[in-house]
Image (cartoon, helix red, strand yellow):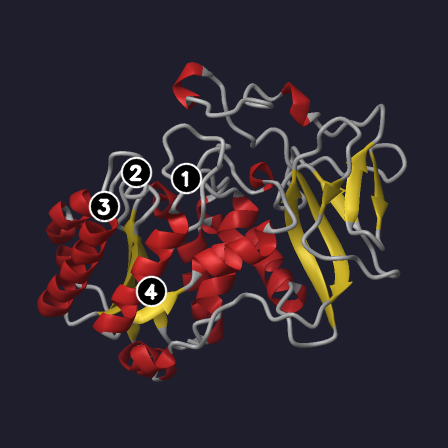
Amino acid sequence: MMRLFSYFSAIAACALLAGCAAHRQIGESVVLVGQQPATLSHVSTSRGRIDVRSTYLDGLTNTIHYVRGQDYEIVRTAGTIRRTANSRIPDFQTNVLYGKDNFDHTEFPGYGNNGYFAFVDYPFRSSKRWPKQRSQTQFLPKTLAKLRSGQNVKIVAFGDSITAGGEATHPELIYWQRWADALQRKYKHAHVIAINGATGGDTTVQGLQRLQTKVFDQKPDLVLIAFGMNDHNIGSVSIPQFETNLAEMIGRIRKANDAEIILLSTFPPNPKWKYGSHHMQDYAAASEKVARDQKCAYADIFSSWRAIAEKKKPEDLLGNNINHPNDFGHWMYFAVLNGLGL
């Protein structure tokens, strides 16, 4: 735990948050195909240390630090990285889903990307603001007051397998746990408690059925509602029903617990996956509309994810190669929550 705490403290001190001149990106993930160049989300500055390793967290017993010239080449001015001919970095061409279009993951045992990532730390400069998240403190006055006055704050993270922690390699790397830990470090006299109330595979339909045990019985002060990935799948929950379900969740939580709420959108799954409707932008817009109509906080995961993903392959960010963020993807969620202003 001490190693993780120290690592997160370092990230808090130097990770990217645009608006100032110099930044350092920590643990950006990429999969490398043959000797083809892959693009990072930023162009590196001409000076400053670059580190490429096999694990998101540094210093683990299985961490391999890759050597420039031996394992990879990087072009700072282009923001690209590629494997060398004899690299120790796994070649993504050997992934069971590489090159498969409209794939059914159930037909490919052993699918997933977690053995293929290279994680890159590098310095960069940017004038663009990221994450694309506005402060939402106007919707979270009770939570903010409790944090500032050193009271107990109980957070329930309610959603699907992403929120349950799918593909995070350590519990401390799940996005909402990272955020709760960051709040605890910021508000040292408060007592921040975070509870995992998520269930893999759930849509908003199952979410409504689980409200009593997963949310009401926990007596939360703040609830993160994070659905959409399964709702958007082919034959699942229509957008009008999705909006209705979210609004009902919010109303019932407020009535039962008088808790404040943060509604999260989610990101697009792999466009090559057979079971996605690939209209996540519409579900994200629906989530934002419900948050606006219900006057609750909104965490815009979708826009921030898309801003980084513009320069990257979907596989660079997906732990299961389908619809689960890897450790860096969980960091992206965390960074958006940090942008809420608490």
Q: Amino acid at mark 4?
A: Glu
**Tag 2's secondary structure?**
loop
Return the x and y of residue 219 as percentages of the image width and height: 17, 63
Return the x and y of residue 84 as percentages of the image width and height: 84, 30
**Tag 1's secondary structure?**
loop
**Tag 4's secondary structure?**
helix
Quarter of image, res 5: bottom right
Q: Amino acid at mark 3?
A: Ser
Residue identified by numbered label 2: 200
Which residue is nearer to you in this view: 172 or 197? 197
Q: Earlier in the sequence, mark 4 or mark 2?
A: 2
Query: Can residue 302 be seen in this snapshot?
Result: yes
Which residue is nearer to you in this view: 119 or 145? 119
- x 36%, y 78%: residue: 147
Closer to us: mark 4 or mark 2?
A: 4
Closer to us: mark 1 or mark 3?
A: 3
Q: Considering only vertical position in the picture, is 315 above or below 282?
A: above
Looking at the rendered structure, which numbered label has been put on residue 166?
1
Q: Quadrant of the C terminus?
A: bottom left
- x 72%, y 46%: residue: 39
